[in-house]
Amino acid sequence: MREIRLALLEADVNFKVVKELIDRIQAKAVGQEVLTALSPGEQVIKIVRDELVETLGKDTARMKFASQPPTVVLMAGLQGSGKTTTSGKLANWFKTGGHRPLLVSVDVYRPAAREQLKIVAQAVKAQIYEGEVGEANTPAQLTQAVERLVKEARREAIVSGCDVLIVDTAGRLHIDDELMNEMQSLKKLLNPSEILFVADAMTGQDAVRSADEFHKKLSLTGVILTKMDGDARGGAALSIRQVTGQPIKFIGVGEKYDALEPFHPDRIVSRILGMGDILSLIERAESQIDKKKAQEMATKALTGDGFSLEDFRDQLRQVKKMGSIKSLIGMMPSIGPFAGLQKAADSVDEKQINRVEAIINSMTTHERNHHEVINGSRRKRISRGSGTTVQEVNNLLRQYAQMKKMFKQMGKPSFARRMAGMKLPGM
């Protein structure tokens, strides 16, 4: 129980939530009949996992749609949580599902906020209602401007055939009465199908407190956790769900506009317990990587001879499409043979991949396909062209040669026989 408590606290789960969970887990674990297929330790882990999944909600939460379009989605959250960018990502997600979203910003206090949403809408090729704020200086005039904007936006959605209206609201650095009064007014005006609270997973317990406050005043219907591709292990998700009782509907896993994923409770539990999120990693790979190209590259790599620096560069580009190396390593387990990966993630220099690509780009096609011709003078030319040092060029060529040799070894039948005879740890 002590180890489980520490694992949960390290994953940034609220200490009160941890205490409640541990009490429930103990009640279930004491006197529980041990399954024949599991050891007592494994049985306890199973109880922990099942309890965490139960807390987060067994199934992926679905979006609610209005019986009469447009479905209104009200975005709530503090300033800096990523609300505007997430509104754009959500619009992109709706578009992928065959819907026609319309975006509108009612942040009349910061002109830059409305301009930012316009840029985001253009990036995801979604419709936006800009409207006019006019001369609004007093609090009463600003409130009238907000109400006018949302009424006009809803009318625009109906006229233009948009079935979803996403309302990006004003944020504050902290919760105050002015912010809450405006949100309550918008809720009354729009009767939204969804009120989604956008929280930065990296802020941990601050996100939990804010979610609780917003839920008390607005009755949230769900939460979107941003920056889940960083160091956050998902403890905030567990805490917010336990404190508000509302489901986590999406998680932001990167800066790109398609980096918004539906929240899968069972997968986030695996991340909290240090077991990784292999399923999401596979899904990301399937959506971003060209299968035919990957197959061709694998065949080339395992023969050893056909794997050129050009192929190596293409492989790097495919990996970059999937997101940062740190986020990919974060999806791997932090236990067993993968234990060292998480520590290695801290020392990953993302810019190094760009430098490697720049070095390969500075080579001629002949050099990329026949690396053995690269002599001293060519190395100097390549380093100058890529803005790197000769030593970096030498390191790349040495690592490439080692990689090529390793792939060739893996392609031999003797290697496959040895692997087949190996026993994995714990088996």
Image: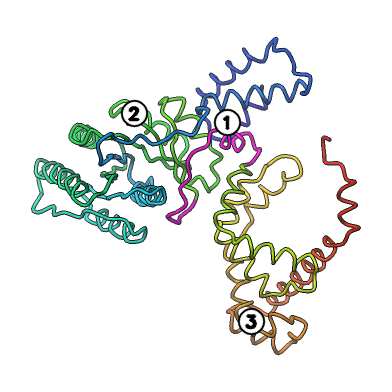
For the point 42% across and 25% down, which residue is it? 245
For the point 66% across and 62% down, which residue is it? 294
Quadrant of the image occupied by residue 208: top left
Q: Which residue lies under the disc numbered 3? A: 383
Quadrant of the image occupied by residue 187: top left
N-terminal label among 2 and 1? 1
For the point 9% across and 44% down, which residue is it? 141
Q: Which residue lies under the disc numbered 1? A: 9
Amino acid type shown at disc 2? His
Q: In this view, does 405 lie above or below 210?
A: below
For the point 65% across and 37% down, which residue is it? 274
Amino acid type shown at disc 1? Leu
Q: Which residue lies under the disc numbered 2? A: 215
Q: Is residue 195 above or below residue 374?
A: above
Residue lying at the far bottom in this picture: please name it: 377
Determine the secondary structure under disc 2.
Answer: helix
N-terminal label among 2 and 3? 2
Whole-angstrom CA distance, mark 2 to mark 1, is 24 Å
Determine the secondary structure under disc 1.
Answer: helix
Whether residue 263 appears in magenta in the rendering, the answer is yes
User: Residue 374, how many percent across, how many down?
Assistant: 73, 85
| Magenta residue span | 254-276
Nearer to us of marks 2 and 3 is 2
Amino acid type shown at disc 3? Ser
